[in-house]
Amino acid sequence: MVEVAEAHEAETLVQEAESLGHRLRKVREAVGRVIFGQEMVVERTLITLLSGGHVLLVGVPGLGKTKLVETLGTVLGLDAKRVQFTPDLMPSDILGSEVLEEDAHGKRAFRFIKGPIFCQLLMADEINRASPRTQSALLQAMQEHRVAIAGEIHPLPAPFHVLATQNPIEQEGTYPLPEAQLDRFLLEIDVSYPDLAAERAMLLATTGAREAKAEPAMTGAELIAAQHLIRRLPVGEQVLEAILKLVRSARPETTNLEEVRRNLAYGPGPRAAQALMLATRARAVLDGRLAPSVEDVLALAEPVLRHRMALNFSARADGVRLSEVIDVLKAQLG
């Protein structure tokens, strides 16, 4: 009986994964009609959402980061909001605040007015322009999916995801994100310039009389179900060992790699391994596969590790890049 039940469960899992893969193809097609030349960015953003995490988009202005968030909100059927981060932004501007109200009988009472964080998809535009105080308020919400105002706990809607943007070239008036908050982002995604063909298609599609609009292809409830399914997918022993080897060898205190000991100030913690485990499963489903491979680990190593490790002073002085260190780590896996 146990074997029959296990076989039935495995068959059900396969059917659910195939159905999810079909829906995700429709999602990618819907996004692709609006977003041009950013296939890798779209794929990794969807991987993050399927894994139930938050994403940090790093790129110069004008590459469609805001458009991507708006499009994903429509395509995935999520309540999306945008906050422009500035140095004078206060925690209450994001979380909300209590106001004192008086009714018709003269009775006074506090009422909580929700801030823009009470949504399912929050775009934190130029997050590194906010003060550390405001960043710390967002940190609790990202980790715990709830906020505390005047001693009261207010849960955030489900699903809840933060898609933050950061400009890599403008450093004046910015506050670098602390390591604790960077670690809350599942992936850090570089948004680069589109190639010639994609930019040509974008130019023709966005400057005419009619512009393509995003259409729903999924719902918030379906996304939550997909996130639960991702966690049920099997992971082979080879993939598990590859994840552990990659993450543990990136720590200068315990690694056997001279390049890591010489160049890194600190390495990734256990959350990096958790992120890789979930992200490889999500990537497999996006590609129409039922289980991740070592190739998925190699493909996602850089966006998972890059913001969870830092070069030391001597490495920065010598012009060493984090991508070079990550390439050494990946070379161990073949």
Image (tube, grey):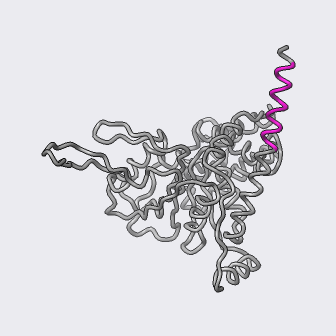
* Count of picture labels: 0
Report if residue 130 lies within the magenta region. Answer: no
Report if residue 8 lies within the magenta region. Answer: yes
Q: Residue at x 41, y 55 (%)?
A: 116
Q: Residue at x 44, y 46 (%)?
A: 139
The reply to whether residue 253 is in sight is: no
Work out whether residue 277 or residue 16 is closer to the camera in this orientation and state it. 16
Q: Position of residue 132 (x, y in %)?
A: 37, 53
Q: Position of residue 65 (x, y in %)?
A: 58, 66
Work out whether residue 249 or residue 147 is closer to the camera in this orientation and state it. 147
Q: Position of residue 221 (x, y in %)?
A: 62, 44
Image quadrant assignment for residue 297: top right
The reply to whether residue 141 is in sight is: yes
For this orientation, the residue located farthest to the left is 106
- The part of the chain drawn in magenta is 4-18
Work out whether residue 139 or residue 158 is closer to the camera in this orientation and state it. 158
